[in-house]
Amino acid sequence: MNFNQVLLMGRLTRDPEMRSTTGGTPVCEAGLAVNRYFTSNGEQRKETLFIDVVFWNGHATALCSKAKKGTPIFVDGRLELDAWTSQDNQKHSRIRAVVNSFQLLTSKEFVAGETTASAKAEVPEAPVAMTS
């Protein structure tokens, strides 16, 4: 059995970029910074992972109209391999998260989630999915 689901909480690293496919389907891409807190040699440390995220259809429209760089967000999605060949015939690939649902967070909710994660306490409940 295989299972592909990712839950991420972080801040947008850039303003969401809206575009449409040739068929007219709305697509919004953004970057997400996700922090991981851990202890190494008795010292509290923070590691930041930068992840590309993509929103489709109503989620794309909702995110682009309500969020900007720095907005705290919780996403539920799946990982996808995005592969392409550039004009100079070089092959490229990246792993990105395709969002199934998301919740914009208040700064208070975000800080509470980060504090909980850094204390290695119980993980906060996932927020209700935003529907379009």
Image: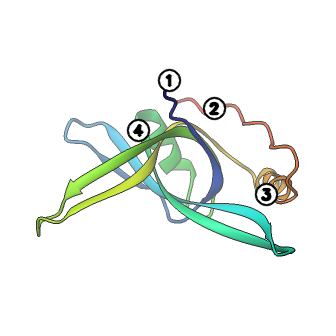
Disc 3 packing (10 Å; few <14; some 14–19; many ≥20): many
Instruction: Give yes or no for contact between labels 3 and 4 (Cβ–Cβ under 8 Å).
Output: no
Percent x, y of residue 85: 17, 58
Percent x, y of residue 35: 68, 62
Q: Which residue is tagged 2?
A: 129
Mark 3 vs mark 1, CA separation in Å: 32 Å
Relative horizontal placement of residue 8, taking residue 53 as reference (left or right): right
Mark 4 vs mark 2, CA separation in Å: 14 Å
Of the image marks 3 and 4, the number of the one nearer the N terminus: 4
Q: Which residue lies at the image location 25% right of the left edge and 42% below the top edge?
A: 21
Disc 4 packing (10 Å; few <14; some 14–19; many ≥20): some
Q: Secondary structure at mark 3?
A: helix
Q: Which residue is tagged 4?
A: 56
Of the image marks 3 and 1, the number of the one nearer the N terminus: 1
Q: Which residue lies at the image location 69% right of the left edge and 31% below the top edge?
A: 128
Viewer-side residue, 84 vs 132: 84
Mark 3 vs mark 4, CA separation in Å: 27 Å
Percent x, y of residue 79: 46, 43
Percent x, y of residue 16: 47, 56
- Name, please, the residue furthest toward the left: 88
Of the image marks 1 and 4, the number of the one nearer the N terminus: 1
Of the image marks 2 and 1, the number of the one nearer the N terminus: 1
Amino acid at dot 1: Met
Q: Which label was assigned to residue 1?
A: 1
Tell us which disc is closer to us: 3 or 1: 1
Q: Is residue 78 visible?
A: yes
Q: Which residue is tagged 3?
A: 114
Amino acid at dot 2: Ala
Amino acid at dot 3: Glu
Disc 1 packing (10 Å; few <14; some 14–19; many ≥20): few
Tell us which disc is closer to us: 2 or 1: 1
Viewer-side residue, 104 vs 1: 1
